[in-house]
Image (cartoon, rainbow, N blue to C red):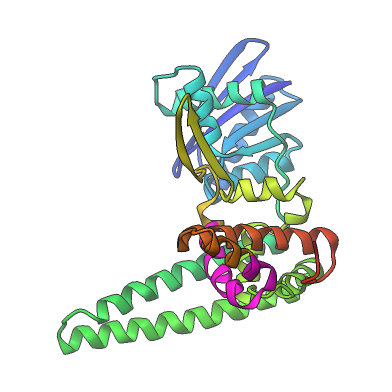
Amino acid sequence: MVYLGVDVGKAEFFCAMVDDGKWHRNSFPNTRKRFQRLSAWLRNRRVNELQACMEATGGFSEALAQYLVDCGFVVSIVNPFAIKAFSQSELSRTKTDKADAALIARYAAAMKPLAWVPPSRAERRLRQLVRRRHDLVSMSIQERNRLEAPASEAAQSSIEGSIDFLKAQVVEIDREIRDVIDGDPDLRRKRELLTSIPGFGSTSAAALLGELPRIDEMSSAKSLTALAGLCPQQRQSGTSLNSSRLTRLGRRSLRRLLYFPAVAARRANPRVKALADRMRLRGKTGMQIIVASMRKLLILAYGVLKSGRPFDPSWA
């Protein structure tokens, strides 16, 4: 097997390939029209079986990953923290694009990461819309905060116009999100299962499916909560014992979208409410309770999607 490490940037990507101990390096423009240059480079080196590995960098990496999969190659997209940890294990001190590409190739050869499964067209569209909606809401909040500050009449009128425009854009995005989900039987079924859980509405269910459309294919609920960074991490060394805290390796976007559903679930979901009450009696802080509620809600989401059955409060 030939291993290809790819360090993806906005304008170009750097490749480092190790084949039977021999290294090959090159760089290419990061545009769909220029991906063929990479194919030609691989053909010239008679590469037939290849596992390409790259860090998760959103759209910049996934377009190239999709192209390589279409070419018949195995592709892995890994958490940047995993690459960083591997670099630290090698005591690596060099930080350049070329060095990073070689580092990723060594990681792939040593760790054999799982193959990436490309999302469907509807899943890609949903994720783009969900992330765009988050951006619009964030901009709207910023404008509302500016409206509270002293400003001239002209400035306030401009801000109010911007808020109205952003509100209309959110309404339009919500309509497109509904259309995408309604037009895909699998996504529609998953949305119905998620919204059966008190705490999840149509917006939060769509956001979760946009970030993780194939939750039910994960091996366990524990791996899902680890992906979201909702697993407690205990730190102990000798006689020193620090309090548990969340690992920083998970996806911040997942924790962000689970916050408000968890707040709602503390009131409306009997399973989450019981957990919150127990933690409150033990003297846990409000944020600790919220985080635990987020984790519980994510486990319930995994349960309904994995089983294909709506939420039942009597589940043990």
User: The N terminus appears in which quarter of the rendering?
Assistant: top right
Residue at image location 70% in from the left, 27% down from the top = 112
Q: Check residue 258 for magenta coloring.
A: yes
Residue at image location 50% in from the left, 53% down from the top = 252
Q: Is residue 14 above or below residue 170?
A: above
x, y percent for residue 108 = 64, 26
User: The C terminus appears in which quarter of the rendering?
Assistant: bottom right
Residue at image location 61% in from the left, 62% down from the top = 127
Q: Is residue 115 above or below residue 152?
A: above
x, y percent for residue 250 = 55, 46
Number of marks drawn = 0
Q: Which residues are magenta?
A: 255-274
x, y percent for residue 210 = 63, 62
Residue at image location 72% in from the left, 70% down from the top = 194
Q: Main secondary structure of the magenta part?
A: helix
Question: Is residue 102 shown left or right of residue 160?
Answer: right
Corner quadrant of residue 92 = top left
Tell me, yes or no, if residue 58 can be seen here: yes
Corner quadrant of residue 65 = top right
Depth order, front residue of 221/170: 221
Q: Is residue 129 above or below residue 215?
A: below
x, y percent for residue 61 = 56, 44
Tell me, yes or no, if residue 28 can be seen here: no
Q: Check residue 46 for magenta coloring.
A: no
Q: Is residue 129 above or below residue 47?
A: below
